[in-house]
Image (cartoon, rainbow, N blue to C red):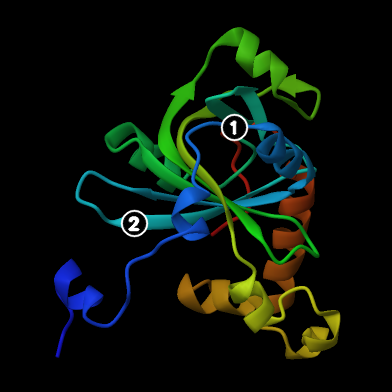
Amino acid sequence: MQLSSTDDLRTLYRPARGGAVDKVIDHIDEHCIEFLAKSPLLILSSADANGVVDGSPKGGEPGFVEALDSHRIAWADSSGNNRLDSFENIVENPSVAALFLIPGLPETLRINGTAELSTDPALCERFTLGGRPTKVVCVVTVHEAYIHCAKALKRSSLWDTDTWLSDEDLPDAVCMLRDHAAIDARVDEIRAGYDDDVDATLWSPGGTTGPAS
């Protein structure tokens, strides 16, 4: 049987209640500000006008995402590959979801809202990268903010270094890139160019060529 309605789902799952529902707020408070100040990574989910979804990691030094006020957060667009998957989605469909992580902490912060892309000079100056104002700042108006329980990260043992794979057992991103993009070159040649490009553009403002992907 395929579950195709909320009624179908609720035959198997009881309604959410208590803290799972009551914890959701519609603004950024002091707890959210502290979490953002200590988070170096978020996963941004967005969708295009047809509802096709994309998930994209965004990273920086802890606190790279700032609260502009009690209802808005923002971050600079750093260097990428100019695919603009998230940004193209946002200009078509502003609804986004952001999941913030802090290394070592099993809980995550979830923020849902509507995004806009700003080129306001003062805002771009505020979010300077590599000594230069960023080209674009992503601003999210917060509709929901809440702490997400630790179960998923505890089940995955994500922060338990004893469970981490050795370097030789990790998937090789350069091999994947070569085969998926059908690049006619040796792996060591691609790896050298890939690593050099990532290092050179790591802290550049958005819109650079960035690493091939």
- Which residue is found at the position 74% from the left and 49% from the top? 40
- Which residue is found at the position 59% from the left and 74% from the top? 152
- Which residue is found at the position 85% from the left and 87% from the top? 162
Crowd class of label 1 (few under 14; some 14 to 19; many from 20; radius 10 Å): many
Tag 2: amino acid: Val
Q: Nearer the viewer, residue 13 or 202?
A: 13
- The CA span between labels 2 and 1 is 25 Å
Classify residue 12 as left or right of residue 154.
Answer: left
First along the sequence among labels 2 and 1:
1
Crowd class of label 2 (few under 14; some 14 to 19; many from 20; radius 10 Å): some
Tag 1: amino acid: Ile
Circle 1 SS class:
loop
Which residue lies under the disc numbered 2? 53
Residue 25 drawn at (x, y percent): 50, 39
Looking at the image, residue 1 lies above or below residue 52: below
Residue 148 drawn at (x, y percent): 57, 59
Q: Report the disc number at residue 28.
A: 1
Looking at the image, residue 56 lies above or below residue 141: below
* Residues at circles 2 and 1 in contact by the CB criterion of under 8 Å: no
Circle 2 SS class:
strand
Looking at the image, residue 102 lies above or below residue 179: above
Residue 213 drawn at (x, y percent): 54, 59
